[in-house]
Every structure is written in structure tokens, then in C-alpha cells.
Amino acid sequence: MKNKEQKIFLQALDELEKEKGITKESLLETIEQALLAAYKKQYSEDDNVEVVIDRKTGDIKVYSTKEVVETVYDEAHEIEIKEAKKIDRKVELYDEIKVEINCEDFRRNAIQNGKQIVIQKVREAERKNIFEKFKEKEHKIINGIIRRIDDRNNIYIEFDKIEAVLPMVEQSQSDIYRVGDRIKVYVVEVQETGKFPKIVISRKHEGLLIELFKIEIPEIEEGVIEIKSVAREAGSRAKVAVHSSDETIDTIGACIGQKGLRIKEIVDELNGEKIDIVEYKEDKKKFVSAALSPARVYSVELLEDEVTARVLVDPSQLSLAIGKNGQNARLAAKLTGMRIDIKTLGEANE
């Protein structure tokens, strides 16, 4: 290897240390181990061989550790004292000494092998950094910029020079996506794989709604008000059950905000998705009744299985209780974890 090429190689490691946060020493140690394995495979399986990269010059040398003896019987592991004195005048009989092995072909190719090892190490470090960075954001909202949209309507979003894909199945039906727009997404899951980390982001997940509530409503972030459950049909409608152990707090009022400003910010972020805020009740009957808002409920009866609620409403409230295409009843059932059977007073009398 030429000195110039060795110096360029070391300079490249310095740059990587600054840019990628991978220490130069760890890279050199990795290269030495990999080159040693390559040398053993090509030349010798002996354990007494060592590959050393000079930290200042980048020169690569191969050494064999040998015992100093009077008469050599095993050339692979022994060296005559006369020859050993040429390397180190202070050496004594039965000392161990490192002897450089002349292997120009191996040394000539070593720098190229080193480059490949560094590339692989950098890729591994980048994958690890991306994984750790997104793992910290798991179950949180992150902000990005839409960079492109493919012919399958997958949205490619950049987050601090890292790109993630928002697939069709995780998109909200009310969203409009334009290249260059800033966008908030919810990080559903981050998994470490053999290649690039698997990052699942969503605009449809209920977690997005919960995190938006935390951002816009300080009492929720502080734990004064608790979100008990959420039911959402993204882009259309959602119901959020809230509760506070502090009876002096108006939970629904706090979530709506003065002149409705808090809830408006959330609705605007979700492009007009309707949000019903419901007061959570320990009493299942009262909770089911509240969950069917904005419909007014006449009565709620729990059946023997404790998971079915028979709800009676005035005929004028039936369509409101069920909702368009059954949406209101469906969301109320999901919010409460109950099966809800809605009937009018007339049907009940019959």
C-alpha cells in the first residue's frame, strides 16, 4: 500500500468519527479483527498471528508471536535467539517476541478489504442510530415534510434526513397530502430488523388523537385529566372519554377550551374530523348513556352477561343515537367496551 492511500484512509475514518459518531478506534479494531480472520483463512489458522494497523501512518502489518529458543524445532512458534536479538537486543531465552511476517500480497489488498469493512460498519451504525432515534419517539407524534407520493399513494416523509413511508392503510380519509407540506404523524411501532429498521407511522391510529390532546390540553399532559378510552374512525368521527379525580375540574370544558379553541386546534389538525368528548363514568349504565351523545337516552339496562346494554330512546332520538350508517352506536360500543342494543320506547312497550 502506498503511504498516500494509507493517509487518505485514516482521514476518512476521522471524518466518519465526526459525521456518524463512530469512534475511529472502534473502526480500526473491527478492521484488524476482520483482516486477521481473512489472513488466517488464506495463510494460517495459528492463534499466534496478529494484524496491527499503525494509528499514525495507516500501515498494516502482520505479526506472529514466537518463543525465543536456542534451537528451533517449530518454525511457526519458535525463533532462534540470534535472530530474535536482531529484532530486540534486550530479548532473553524463552521470552515471547512479535515477529513481522512478510506478506506483501495480503498487505496490498488489505486497504481495499478495510474500506469494505468500514462501509459495512457505517451502514450498521446508521441503522442502529435510526432505530434508536425512532425508538425514542415510539408512541409519540413527530413532524416531517412530505417529499414524494408514489403511484400507489404511499407518502414518503422526511424526518431530519431520515425517510419513512406512510402507506395507504395508515392514512386518514380526510387528509390531503401535498409534496412540500409539513405533517404530523404518530409513531406506532419501531422494530429492529436485519436491514433497515421497520418504522410504522400513522395518521389513522387512535394514538395520534391521544397525543394531540396531550399537546393542546395541559391538564392531560400533567395528569390532572386522564383519557380513559378512545374510539376513532379516522377522518370522520371520534369519541374520547375523559375523567378527573378532582371534582372541581370541568373535564369536558377544559378539553374544549375557552371559546372552543383547544378542541378546534385538534379538529383542524385532523382536517375536520368530528370529536365527541364524553365524561367517563364508573357506572356502566351512565357511561353508555354519555357515550351515545349527542343523543338523549331514556334508560339503560344491563343484561345478565354484563357486557350488553339495552338502551331505550325516544323515537325522535333514534337516528341520532344510531348515527349515520350506525357510526354513533358503533363508536359508543367501542368506547365503553359494551354491546349496545338500541330500541325506541314504543318497541320496548310492544
Image (cartoon, rainbow, N blue to C red):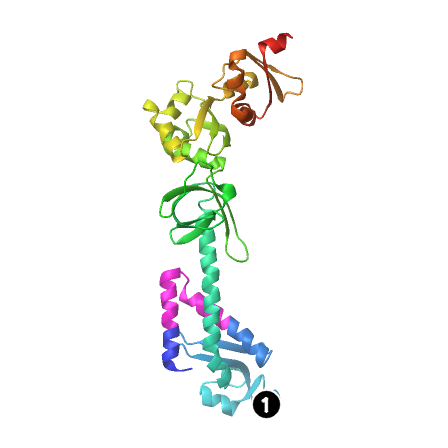
Residue 191: x and y in percent read 53, 50
State left or right for residue 246 relative to residue 317.
left
Above or below 155: residue 223? above
In the image, residue 221 lies in the stretch drawn in magenta: no
* Residue range highlighted in magenta: 10-33
Give the amino acid at mark 1: Val
Above or below 179: residue 343? above
Q: Residue at x 45, y 28 (%)?
A: 226
Residue 21: x and y in percent read 39, 60
Res 115 visible: yes
Above or below 95: residue 151? above
Residue 114: x and y in percent read 46, 73
Q: Residue at x 47, y 27 (%)?
A: 240
Above or below 192: residue 345? above
State left or right for residue 191 relative to residue 22.
right
User: Seen from this angle, which residue lies furthest front?
Assistant: 151
Q: Residue at x 48, y 27 (%)?
A: 239
Q: Residues within 10 Å of mark 1 (few under 14, many from 20)?
A: some
Q: Quadrant of the N terminus?
A: bottom left
Res 57 visible: no
- Determine which residue is flagged by label 1: 72
Magenta region, main secondary structure: helix
Secondary element under disc 1, as helix, strand or loop, is: loop
